[in-house]
Amino acid sequence: MSSQAIDDQLWIAARQCMFPPSSFAAGPAEVSACVSLAGTARGSAVLDLACGPGRHTLPLARAGYQVVGVDYSAAYLDELGRRLDDEAKGRGRPFDVDLVHCDMREFSRPRSFDLALSLYHSLGYFRDDADNQRVVAVLHDSLRPGGAVVVQLVAKESLRKGFRPHISVDLDDGTQLIQQRAPSEDWSWMDVRWTFVREGSERSFDLSHRIYSAQELREHLCAAGFDGVALHGGFDGRAYDRAATTLVAVARRSA
């Protein structure tokens, strides 16, 4: 079986728990906060890298932005395409949205966007850190001079607080999701295995990822050429401090 087919099995299995209705309900406010933090004008061109089923792509499109959504999951892009088509029929005209199926390391539209988004811990899924840096370079190179990127993830500082190596969740369809997590000794990498148990059958998937501290994320952004990296503890722009449960970084391309 191809790696693409395996990946799509993962994202289909994880769809319900990763993107419940509440996540779509939160999308418009998160989009509004991102464009406010970045100072992006309405109608600008926006790159939603690792867009998933579109909980940010959709509100961006509804608000009149020109959006390119990029994802490696064909299943998620198909779902997003259907949502866009259904809404376009209701409004009587299409949205200005382009959906691209590709590896986010390989996406290339230099100097095409005013805003780039990497949200919901979409950065850091490659064991070779050069690949993760390549994703940051894609975000930088995709922006026009003066354009901004917004990156949101759970950083090392907050992840270590109250860490639980084993989590079990009962999903609405009767599936049990078992999450097993093991950080490396220096907390630079998290081995993660999700196991879905339903009616006596099990399917397990690897969701391991890089763990960034706030300073490490700043360094990665600066290494790619970004200037003026601002770190926040939420989409509302609050300070990134010991109480923060998420990290939101805003950086700008100067040239």
Image: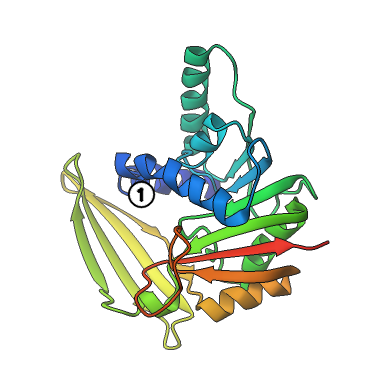
Q: Amino acid at mark 1?
A: Met
- On the image, which quarter does residue 42 sit in? top right
- On the image, which quarter does residue 229 sit in? bottom right
Q: Secondary structure at mark 1?
A: helix
Residue 44 relative to residue 153: left or right: right
Of 39 and 124, the residue lying toward us: 39
Residue shown at 27%/74% (left/top)?
165
Residue 54 relative to residue 105: left or right: left
For the question of whether residue 194 can be seen, the reply is: yes
Which residue in the structure is indicated by mark 1? Answer: 18
Image spot of residue 151 (x, y percent):
55, 60
Residue 222 relative to residue 4: left or right: right
Instruction: Pick out the residue farthest to the bottom.
Output: 185
Residue shown at 66%/49% (left/top)?
115
Seen in the picture, residue 169 relative to 80 is either above or below; the reply is below
Seen in the picture, residue 66 relative to 20 is either above or below; the reply is above
Local crowd at mark 1 within 10 Å, few (<14), some, or many (≥20)?
A: few
Instruction: Pick out the residue farthest to the right.
Output: 255
- On the image, which quarter does residue 16 sit in? top left
Of 81 and 145, the residue lying toward us: 145
For the question of whether residue 7 can be seen, the reply is: no
Image spot of residue 82 (x, y percent):
48, 24
Residue shown at 54%/71% (left/top)?
231
Residue 71 relative to residue 23: left or right: right
Residue shown at 38%/72% (left/top)?
244
Image spot of residue 129 (x, y percent):
62, 73
